[in-house]
Amino acid sequence: MALTVLFAAGPGYWDRYAAPLRAAFDKAGIAAHLSEEAAPETVDYIVYAPSSSLQDFTPYTRTKAVLNLWAGVERIVGNPTLTQPLCRMVDPALTEGMVEWVTGHTLRHHLWLDRYIVNSTREWDPTCPPLARERQVAMLGMGALGEACARALQALNFNVEGWSRSPKSVPGIPCHHGADGLRDVLAKADIVVTLLPKTPETENILNAGTIAGMKRGAVILNPGRGPLIDDTALLAALDNGQIGHATLDVFRVEPLPQDHPFWAHPRVTVTPHIAADTRPLTASMVIAENIRRGEAGEPFVNLVDRARGY
């Protein structure tokens, strides 16, 4: 008997995902009826994005798992009607995209490329940037994305240290945790990358106090979550030179409002949430694998810990 898989991901997703999901189901040997509409009591799995109009999971009494298309689950994990297992998206292609964005912008700031691309001063200054091994990078967040980015930068000879809320052990990369660890990694870093999930504990983790403890002139790269940074504190630190530049891919409100001061600030680069995106082909294979696991009685991969929020 075919499974019923409800696709509840909001406008614009169906045309991109319908064919790749069906192909992935066929490849995995899953007999499933995939549709944007289904009676709740018949649904076995829900392929989901938090932008969906589906917000009440109570009627889905047969549903074995909700399979999120996004890496972030902060907009769904606190939903009191969601009692089914929730899996977040860990897509190999998403990781590749994030590594490329972080590596590219780290090298951009490391090599002072902006001064040569813009040439606004028209000054002939033959000062060479330091070598990568002379730069210190702090990776805030050592999950799958943070670890992958840290390893890519380390392979280029950057000195990388990681920080996470709870203790982590990553061979070859010094890892810190807790308030003292955060203070230590920020104080040393020339470049700080934020790849933490959004939780009550991480919101505004870069605030007036923590930013004041950073090395003067340090660069911030935020491809993680907009609320990780206190916007007002960041703007003040950019204005007084405490922070040399901020390259931001995520924001509290998206699209970033046209009147937001980030757009016009000379020390801010805005990229429109392009650091990493879920790719339909590879994401569909992740979804199919979790459905295969559910039907085989195996543990789901990327299962969300509700208590921790990710």
Image: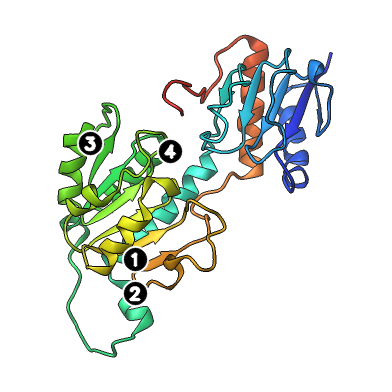
Query: Is 261 displayed left or right of 187 in the figure?
Result: right
Q: How is the structure coloured here?
A: rainbow
Could you tell me the amino acid type at mark 3? Answer: Gly
User: Pointer 1: what residue?
Assistant: 108
Query: How far is the residue under mark 1 from the one under mark 4?
Result: 26 Å
Q: CA–CA distance between discs 1 and 2?
A: 7 Å
Residue under numbered circle 2: 114
The residue tagged with tag 3: helix, strand or loop? Answer: loop
Horizontal and vertical percent for residue 272? 53, 60
Q: Would you call the spot at circle 3 few (<14 residues within 10 Å), some (14-19), or many (20 or more)?
A: few
Regarding residue 177, the answer to whether it shows in the image is no
Question: Pointer 3: what residue?
Answer: 172
Q: Secondary structure at mark 2?
A: helix
In the rendered image, which quarter contains the N terminus? top right
Give the Cα separation between the discs numbered 4 and 2: 30 Å
In this view, the mark in front (3 or 1):
1
In contact (CB < 8 Å): disc 3 and disc 1: no
Farthest residue to the top: give it. 297
Q: Amino acid at mark 2?
A: Asp
Question: How dense is the environment of label 1, judged by Cα within 10 Å: few (below 14), some, or many (20 and up)?
Answer: few
Secondary structure at numbered mark 1: helix
Quadrant of the rendered structure where residue 238 is? Answer: bottom left
Percent position of residue 209, x then y: 21, 48
First along the sequence among labels 1 and 2: 1
Find the distance from the CA under tag 3 to the CA under tag 1.
Answer: 25 Å
Q: Give the number of callouts.
A: 4
